[in-house]
Amino acid sequence: MRQNVRSTFSTSERDSRVKVALVFGTRPEAIKMFPVVHALRAQPGVETRVIVTAQHRGLLDQVLEIAGIVPDIDLDVMVPNQTLDGLTAKLIVELGKAFDAEKPDRIVVHGDTLTTMVASLAAYYRKIPVAHVEAGLRSGDIHHPWPEEVNRRVVACIADMNFAPTQAAADALLRENRDAAGIHITGNTVIDALLATRDRVVADASLASGLDDLAARFAGKRIVAVTSHRRENFGGGMEAIARSIADIAARPDVAVIFPVHPNPNVRPVMDAVLGDLPNVAMIEPLDYPHFVRLLDLCHLVLTDSGGVQEEAPSLGKPVLVMRETTERPEGVEAGTAKLVGTDRALIVREVLALLDDQDAYDAMARAHNPFGDGGAAERIAVVIAAG
Ligand code: UDP
């Protein structure tokens, strides 16, 4: 861990570049922030530093390595079975110390994690302006997703630059009386990450060859890609999801590929129900190129993830969302995503409909980019550089 006693920014009086610290801690944040890091670094008037909290250690490191980003400060806060209280307390103290040492002119945070919310608060306590990437997503229900819906609302109270991925997100911010001059509609940076990574995988198949090897084991079967990790689904929801996957995988023409999130509330439930099923490959979390390859070659996606809901439509894959509400209605409105909750019978019915009804499948399987065009990070960097 870097000792954060002195600023890592240049301290030369003659250096007039704006000092920007990007702060993040989890895999999805890293995926959506690496294009912003690269775009800001290409701006001559900006000096950047990357501060990671490592709220999810292993998954974060996978992305940093692929993206070629070495954090300037690594707070390494992860401990086993961390509570929201304990993590919040630790983050506010450690991020505060880092900001006192670095004295950035601005911080940039992403989305709705605890790192994001607490970093914004620590910056506010020091009167450091905050830019929020992926601002304005709202489910309208503070318990779904939990605690993310409140995390992002707190950031919106603080940020002076709000980068809304879509018009709907910008409208949500305007409804909350946020200053229109600080709202910029940019598209979602996940599409930048996805398209760039897919290009890399197309150019160099060895980046995702492990996935191709796995898929070859299931030759002739249609692949259902599954991810599940949402906190509000822990317990009964996870159990129902596991049982629905078992029902689906009973079909001989289907294989399920399921990179299992390491959260202790996920793996044991899945192991107990799906452990011995021949058509189910429960695997370790995939690095980003392998996951993009999985999205590319699967038939459909079953997920409770936020980011995956945004990525799948860009690759023309129907996505069934195992949640009661979504803060990403654009996919549902475009007809490429459908909410199925965590009801076992409903999940199975919707998957079977997509497997057996070609018209229903074709209606959802349209490549569509409601979330962005791949140019979001550049737009964000230009606004931040202009200050
Ligand atoms: N992802 C990945 N490997 C995996 C599963 C997901 O790289 O094994 C990526 C996925 O492409 C998406 C992000 O992780 O960009 C989503 O992360 P997660 O579902 O953990 O979080 P959420 O988006 O719900 O906040």
Image (cartoon, grey):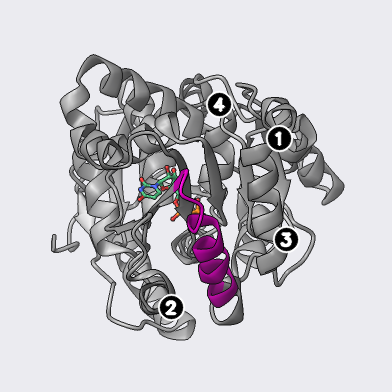
For mark 2, does the 10 Å Cα neighbourhood hold few (<14), some (14 to 19), or many (20 or more) residues? many
Residue segment shown in magenta: 238-254
Circle 3 is placed at which residue position? Answer: 346
- Disc on the earlier residue, 2 or 1: 2
- Residue at mark 4 to residue at mark 1: CA–CA distance: 22 Å
- Disc on the earlier residue, 4 or 3: 4
Q: Is there CB contact under 8 Å for labels 2 and 1?
A: no
Residue occupying the point 40% across, 69% down:
274
> Looking at the picture, which amino acid does disc 4 mark?
Ser
- Disc on the earlier residue, 4 or 1: 4
Q: What element carries label 1?
A: loop
1 or 3: mark nearer the eye: 1
2 or 1: mark nearer the eye: 1
Q: Is residue 342 left or right of residue 203?
A: right
Circle 4 is placed at which residue position? Answer: 314
> Looking at the picture, which amino acid does disc 3 mark?
Leu
> Looking at the picture, which amino acid does disc 2 mark?
Val
Circle 2 is placed at which residue position? Answer: 269
Q: What element carries label 3?
A: helix
The disc at residue 357 is 1
2 or 4: mark nearer the eye: 2
The foreground one among 350 and 14 is 350
